[in-house]
Image (cartoon, grey):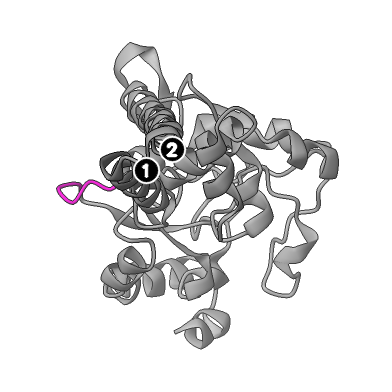
Amino acid sequence: MTDELLEADGIAERKKIIDDNQDLWRSIKGVLAAVGYQKCWYCETADIRSDNAVDHFRPKGRISGEGTEGYWWLAFDVRNYRFACTYCNSRRHGEGGTIGGKADFFPLAAGSRRSDSHLIPISVEIPMLLDPCDQFDITALWFDETGQVKVNPGAEILEENVSDRVAVSRSLYHLDHVRLIEARKRVFLEVLQMCDQADEALVSYKSTQDVMARSIFHESINALRRMKKEDAPYSAVAKCAVRGYRSTSPSAKLIAEAS
Ligand SMILES: [Zn+2]
C-alpha cells in the first residue's frame, strides 16, 4: 500500500488511500498488543477493557502545531506503529487537572531538521518524544517512590537534552496522570517491602537454620524476579525500585545483578 501512496497525485488522494485502508494497521493490533504483553508501550498500563489503538509514532496526517502534512509515507509502515492506551494516544483530561495525550503532536528538538518527504530519512530528526522502541529512550526514564516520571541520571550524562525530552514525553503521553502515579507507587512500595521481607528471612535463616525462614527468602526472591519481568505490571518501575534499593538491601542487590 505504501507504493500506492508514493504514486498518488497530491494530498487528497493520499488521504483517501490512508482513510480507506485503516484496517491494515487495525488488523495487527492483537499482534502488537501481544508483543508488549497487552501493556501500552508508552505507559505500561494494561487495561484489557480499554479500546487501545495502534498509534502512528510519526503522525500519518497533519502534525499539530506544524501545519505540515506529516509522515504519510509511514502510514502503512509497521515500524511506525506503537500499541497505545487511550490516555497516551488521545488528548484527555485526567483527575487533578492533568491533561495529556499524544494525538498528532510530534515535536522535534530545536534546530533539528524535519523529514518532510519520503526522500529524507527520518534519522535526520531529533524527536522530543521518547520512543518505546528505542532502547536508549527507554532507559532515559527513571521512577522513584513518588510514582512520578524522572530522568535517569545516567542518561543525562550521555544526551544533554534528555531532561527536556522526558518532560515533553511526560506531558504528551500523560505520564503524570494521577491513577498512573498511584499505580507506580504501589509497585515501588511492594518491591521495597518484598526486599525487606527477603532480607529479614535471610538473617533469620542464617542465625536459626529455620527452614520456614529459608522458604520465605526463596519465595520473596522469586516474587521479586517476577515483578521485574517484562510481562509484570509496571515492570520498569519495579526495575528502578530494585536498582535504587540495592545499596540498602542485599536481596535487592542480588535481584538487580541477576539477568
Ligand atoms: Zn499508555
Say which of 197 and 202 sits in front. 202
Outermost residue toward the left in this view: 49
* C-alpha gap between disc 2 and disc 1: 6 Å
Residue furthest to the front: 208
Does the image show residue 144?
yes
Of residues 131 and 38, the one nearer the viewer is 38
Q: Is residue 255 magenta?
A: no
Q: Earlier in the sequence, mark 2 or mark 1?
A: 2
- Between 216 and 194, the residue placed more toward the observer is 216
Q: Are marks 2 and 1 in contact (CB under 8 Å)?
A: yes
Q: Position of residue 74 (x, y in %)?
A: 54, 70
Coordinates of residue 207 in the picture (x, y in percent): 44, 33
Classify residue 153 as left or right of residue 97.
Answer: right
Q: Is residue 75 above or below residue 257?
A: below
Q: Which mark is residue 217?
A: 1
Residue type marked 2: Leu
Q: Quadrant of ligand 1?
A: top left
Q: Which residues are magenta?
A: 46-50
Q: Visible in this render: residue 168?
A: no
Q: Quadrant of residue 196?
A: top left
Image x and y of residue 23, in percent: 27, 73
Label number found at residue 142:
none
Query: Residue drawn 47% across and 38% down?
Result: 237
Callout 1 environment at 10 Å: few (<14), some (14 to 19), or many (20+)? many
Query: Looking at the rendered structure, which numbered label has been put on residue 202?
Result: 2
Judging from the image, what secondary structure is the residue with disc 2 in? helix
Asked if residue 252 lies left or right of residue 19, the reply is right
Residue placed most toward the observer, 239 or 3: 239
